[in-house]
Amino acid sequence: MLMRKLTRAALVTTGVIAILAGTASAQDKVKVTFLFDNAPSTVAMAEALATAFEAKHPNIDIETESRPGGADGDNLIKTRLATGEMADVFLYNSGSLFQAINPTQNLVDLTNEPFQANVIDSFKSVVTGTDGKVYGAPIGTAMGGGILYNIPIYKELGLTPPKSWAEFMANNEKIKAAGKTAVIQSFGETWTSQLFVLGDFYNVLAADPNFPADYTAGKAKYATTPVAMKGFERQEEIFKGGYLNEDFAAATFPDGVTKVATGEGAHYPMLSFAVANIKELAPENINDVGFFAIPGDDAANNGLTTWMPSGLYIPTTSKVQAEAKEFIAFVASIEGCDVQTASAGAAGPYLVKDCKLPADVPPVVADLLPYFQEGGHSAPALEFLSPIKGPALEQITVEVGSGIRSAADGAALYDEDVKKQAQQLGLPGW
Amino acid sequence: MAVAVADGAVPIANPRRKSRTAGLYPSWFYLPAAIIFAVLFMLPTVASLFFSLTRWTLQKADFIGLENFAQFFREPFLFQGLVNTLIYGVVTSGLKVVLGMLLALLLTSDIFGRGYLRAVVFFPVLVSTVGVGITFTAMMHPTQGLINETLASIGIKGPGWLTDPRFALYSVAIVDVWKGVGLATVIYIAGIVSIPLEYYEAAKIDGATSWQRFWTVTLPLVHPATATVIILSFIGGLRSFDLIWAMTKGGPGFTSDVIASVIYKQYQAGFYGLSTAGNVVLFVMVALIIVPLSMFLNRKEVDR
């Protein structure tokens, strides 16, 4: 009895093994894993890219996987790189966050890949390691950090997009007098609090072109550079003016996007990529939202602080680097741009030569493009000019923006935070 | 099977053998536990002491002496975090002692549906902390939350429970008490039930009121339970992290940061050496507070 059972079990097991072996040989595909953040627009774009690529390359199977964004995502990327568990292709920020993942040691050199010929140089510079090699390729579009505004409110009150900070504050006063929320903040998600500081960088650079170099060398500080400190002061000014939405401390990013789109508030300081979220959360209001750069003191020199898109990278631990490179080359091609536009909508200009935007872009993008074009004024955010970005900025700007801490105190605290990051990166002069 | 039992019984049955030094089991019985303890507990402890002295990127570690500890104590939010940790520990463990005792008295009396009520009080202990945190965060929303909407319906404008820096830490502490008081209650129920009824009878014969019976019989004799509840909930309060992180992430800003959340943020930012140093500090601090407290509470127990 027992013997017969054992025999049967053995037979079943061999059968299963045979079946498994059969399927494996029939489907002789190379599997490439692809990791990206879980923002709905990124997921849509990444899935569409994977599908389009697989259709062209039937021998390669792209296995997609999403991860949290923000500080949790930073943590996950660093840990997976350190433990050798990173996906074959992964999406991550360019600029200072890219520098913090130790690219020269962890990533595969992509300098001499043919597709780099079509990548615009300004992007290459933000995915270049300390050894001068290029480690990434662009995915998504460039963005601007500025203020989303509700067009119907502007029309109703007869306002025009401001060119200087004084004009902006005058608009806020009129909106407040009309009984509306002038400025939306969403500190329920702390990262959304940083725009007044980070998005003011065009104005910092216009006044002090040496700031990034001095800052990286540990010579220039926020607390002792008046023009850099302005961002903190402006955030404080907005709070003191009483312009904020009632639930600013608990509102989340989707709340903020919905409010500015539906006219529950007039201004929302945000990156222009939020246009994808407007499309998702309030599609019928997509044409009610416009965009302008955070204005500085001088109306004559009005310009935009820009953000580079994220990059795609290959970890040195990947066993299918050739296939991973093929996938990246596809993403950074004109065809790849078109797939991205179709799936997520373009939120700004692409960093691949000759990639075209559709003619009927939403107003946010239409307002954004002139800053990038000939004769427009724009400058990259500090995180693309210096490897240092302090991790606690978002908590500090929440405190300054809710009146818990003064602007001067906040700037000094941020200088301390930056020092830790510089030491961790092993920069000279700290 | 039977043979084994007889073998095991021999040392106890035979007083001539010196079984005390040999122990009840052969020494290799302890080996698996010892290996697990060494690999999973001793080794990481020693390693963390080492890494707390380095600037660590997970791939390389530069020895920098006590610099991390100096940095950690310079951390502007750290002092606030220390104070918050103590406030949180004292508030949660104090409330758990008082409420746990009251609930236990209620649930050991002859009330209707006692078994059901005991289960209800204990139920929050079983629910996931993060789930509780998310639920209460929604209920404590300043404008759309259940609590403030209820208050608004009777004409009171509720504060921003989690968004006002004055209340955030206490709001989390109260949720912690709601979630943890069931455990304290169960410990107290066990303590109260184990008090021999003779004492109450004697007190009754002497004419003690129910108030006097509580102060002179129940309270002193339930002391071991009190010591357990204080120590468990105080340690829990000092190292609490999950609920605070789920509800405020230390915010708004840094106002409800405790040591554990400060440490976690350093880890998140990639300052691995610094956060390891923070953990060493937390370990030392908990030990410095709990060891004397535990000795004090236990000595009292012997005295009585």
Image (cartoon, rainbow, N blue to C red):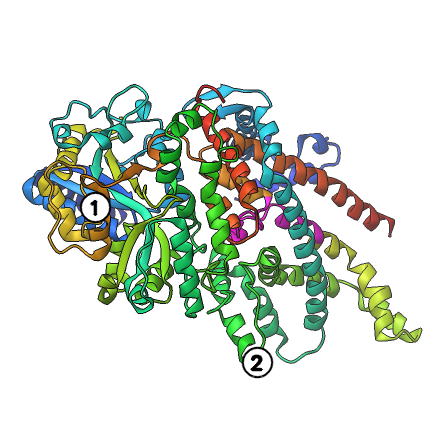
Image depth: mark 1 or mark 2 in front: 1
Labelled disc at residue A370: 1
A333 or B89: nearer the eye? Answer: A333
In the rendered view, tell whether residue A91 sits above or below residue A162. Answer: above
Rendering coords of residue A394 (x, y %) = 46, 45
As helix, strand or loop, the secondary structure at mark 1 comes to helix
Residue marked by disc 2: B154
Q: Is residue A382 magenta?
A: no
As helix, strand or loop, the secondary structure at mark 2 comes to loop
Q: Residue placed at 52% from the left, 33% from the top?
A: A224
Q: Is residue A271 left or right of residue B60?
A: left
In the rendered view, tell whether residue A430 sits above or below residue A172. Answer: above
Q: Residue placed at 58% from the left, 75% from the top?
A: B156
Q: Chain of mark 2?
A: B
Spatial separation of the CA atoms under disc 1 and disc 2: 53 Å
Q: Is residue A377 left or right of residue A331?
A: right
State the extent of the magenta-drawn residues as a range: B230-258
Q: Is residue B253 magenta?
A: yes
Rendering coords of residue A74 (x, y %) = 38, 39
Q: Chain of mark 1?
A: A
Local crowd size for mark 1, using a 10 Å CA cut-off: few (<14), some (14–19), many (≥20): some
Labelled disc at residue A243: none
Residue A113 in view here = yes
B300 or A291: nearer the eye? Answer: A291
The amino acid marked with disc number 2 is Ile
Asked if badge 1 and badge 2 are on a common chain, one would say: no
